[in-house]
Image: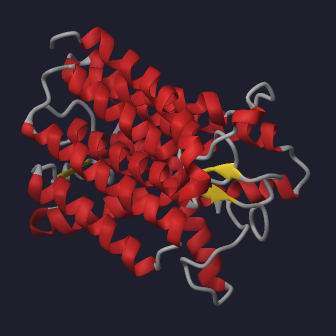
Amino acid sequence: MHYWYLAPLYGFVLTILFSFPMRALAEKWGMVAVPGGRKDHGAPVPMIGGVAMFIGTAWGFEATQSVTADWSMFLVACALMSVIGLLDDVFDLRASVRTVGHLVAALMMTVGAGHVIRLLGDPFFMGPVGTGFLAIPFTVLVTMTVINAYNMMDGIDGLAAGTSLIALAAMAVLATTFGLYPEFIYLDVLMASVLGFLVFNLPMGVNARLRTFMGDAGSMFLGLAITWFGVVLTQGEAAVASAVSVLWFAALPIHDLIATVIHRLLEGRLPWSAGRDHVHHHLMARGISPRWTLALLLATCVAYAAIGLSGPLLGVQDGVLFIAWLLAGAGHF
């Protein structure tokens, strides 16, 4: 890879650099989160972090000078998610329109790039479980679920980006441990771009005047990216981990999505209806500050990632990991 060592730096620096001019355009484009209703952030905040992250990521990928057709498809699919998310931030798209966008991105990964979940591992202690003729629809469903899960995590400063960063870091550990160096560099680029965004989003006080949200453009883009790399690392001849292990990397967002949907259905509400009923809302309603809520949830994600890594690195059985994953989900509910 030519100049691979510069690629993450490009992602980090360009995410920061593009954030400044885009902040100036945010108000003109209507890309500003205005306090009110479920939004209690105090003052209008530009929602351009997701677009800046995508620009940094795309430039960083190109800096490697080794982007194949598969990874070009990845960038196109991520661009689609950024555009759909941008339009949703500005025009508040209907759920059906967002769903179509998620579906198209998932089909680009499965049909376009050929990344499909065909093997789940051994979650039931009965041997490897495959998806058979349902491989493509199953992968599409998983992809759309993870995209929505990370979208719903975007509720307090640093949470969606922090949980994404931990998932990407865990996958980078797998990639470098098992010699998948192109994937490792691409993951580094993504992580660097997320770090560039966190310069404007972490609740540190010193960056209050530059406060920026990623918006749906960022959360949808990151949800797709995490799913894409998860499939790459668990499927095919180059697989380095089971799908059960990698499932832990996104455990908190997925558990929260499932719990929230079930609670809403039990209350007679639509699953996609708005509400302050996610895990971070529940914690803050019990008097925990946003910063401590963020710290607690990110620590949980780190613990979950470590559990997931115990499979490929320490040989913990898929069945044990899957039972533990279900128990963690039940506890979350």
In this view, the residue in front, 304 or 148, is 148
Find the residue positioned furthest to the right: 287
Residue toward you, 57 or 178: 57
Residue 112, horizontal then vertical, whole percent: 10, 55
* Residue found at x 36% / y 40%: 246
The quarter of the picture where residue 172 lies is top left
Q: Is residue 24 visible?
A: yes
Image quadrant assignment for residue 185? top left
Vertical placement of residue 290 versus 83, above or below: above
**Which residue is located at x 17 percent, y 57 percent?**
108
Compared across the picture, whether 102 is left or right of 36 comes to left
Render colour scheme: secondary structure
Residue 310 vertical placement versus 118 (above, below)? above
The N terminus lies in which quarter of the figure?
top left
- Residue occupying image coordinates x 23% and y 40%: 234
Q: Which x, y percent locates residue 10?
A: 37, 20
Q: Quadrant of the C terminus?
A: bottom right
Residue 143 drawn above or below residue 72: below
Q: Position of residue 195 (x, y in %)?
A: 52, 27
Count of marks, rendered view: 0
Q: Is residue 324 among the parts visible in the rendering? A: no
Q: Nearer the viewer, residue 210 or 309?
A: 210
When asked about the image quadrant of residue 7, the answer is top left
Image point (80%, 37%), residue name: 292
Query: 185 or 45, which lies in front?
Result: 45
**Residue 275 pos. (x, y %):** 69, 72
